[in-house]
């Protein structure tokens, strides 16, 4: 079956984007919970996260558990519920149109990064005013709080405000 085959071949052509490891380490040092939410089957998600991220990820969830796959917001909602965190106090970081739609469907703020599967221009074409289901001030407050937590462990600026676009995450 597919799952059996994938379980023994899941490392082929799979590696984390170079920008993600420093970001995860900074978030972890700042005490910010991190999770991976994927449409891959759950055992594969957990295995890949353990192999590539080690203890940098607090929780990983994949297909299964009676939750609908992305772009439905069920898995994001389940992660927030597991930690007892309100959806508006979370930020979903994604790199595809499915990720943007998933965040929207979960009523969770989203940061789109262009160092993943889609280019900056592809992501900008997808972003519209209704991409986020929170007001601009709430998003700015969340970003400010994340910046403060990151600043406790490093002077490096990881989140840049880009006028007229939103926010950009740096390596």
Image (tube, helix red, strand yellow):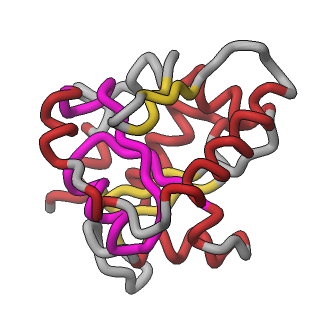
Please tell me which residue is depicted at 24% across the width and 59% down the height of the picture: 3
Q: Work out whether residue 44 or residue 81 is closer to the camera in this orientation and state it.
A: 81
Identify whether 14 is placed above or below 62: above
Please tell me which residue is depicted at 30% across the width and 28% down the height of the picture: 114
Total marks placed: 0
Q: Residue 102 lies in magenta, yes or no?
A: yes
Q: Work out whether residue 78 or residue 61 is closer to the camera in this orientation and state it.
A: 78
Residue 153 coordinates in the image, percent (x, y): 84, 23
Please tell me which residue is depicted at 49% across the width and 56% down the height of the picture: 136
Identify whether 44 is placed above or below 150: below
- Give the residues in magenta: 90-119
Q: Left or right of 35: which side holds 28?
A: right
Residue 27 coordinates in the image, percent (x, y): 69, 35
Q: Residue 130 lies in magenta, yes or no?
A: no
Residue 22 coordinates in the image, percent (x, y): 60, 20
Q: Left or right of 163: which side holds 96?
A: left
Q: Work out whether residue 149 or residue 27 is closer to the camera in this orientation and state it.
A: 149
Quarter of the image holding residue 38?
A: bottom left
Please tell me which residue is depicted at 38% across the width and 51% down the height of the picture: 44
Residue 149 coordinates in the image, percent (x, y): 79, 37
- The quadrant the N terminus occupies is bottom left
Q: Which residue is most to the right?
A: 152
Q: Work out whether residue 25 or residue 170 is closer to the camera in this orientation and state it.
A: 170
């Amino acid at each position: 079956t597919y799952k059996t085959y994938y379980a023994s071949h899941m490392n082929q052509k799979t590696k984390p984007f170079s920008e993600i490891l420093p970001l995860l380490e900074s978030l972890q040092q700042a005490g910010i919970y991190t999770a991976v939410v994927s449409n891959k089957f759950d055992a594969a998600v957990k295995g890949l996260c353990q192999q590539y991220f080690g203890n940098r990820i607090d929780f990983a969830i994949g297909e299964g558990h009676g939750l609908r796959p992305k772009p439905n917001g069920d898995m994001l909602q389940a992660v927030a519920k597991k930690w007892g965190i309100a959806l508006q106090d979370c930020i979903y970081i994604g790199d595809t149109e499915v990720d943007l739609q998933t965040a929207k469907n979960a009523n969770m703020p989203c940061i789109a990064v262009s160092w993943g599967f889609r280019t900056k221009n592809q992501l900008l074409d997808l972003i519209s005013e209704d991409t986020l289901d929170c007001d601009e001030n709430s998003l700015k407050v969340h970003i400010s709080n994340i910046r403060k937590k990151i600043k406790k462990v490093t002077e490096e600026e990881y989140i840049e405000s880009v006028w007229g676009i939103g926010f950009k995450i740096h390596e």
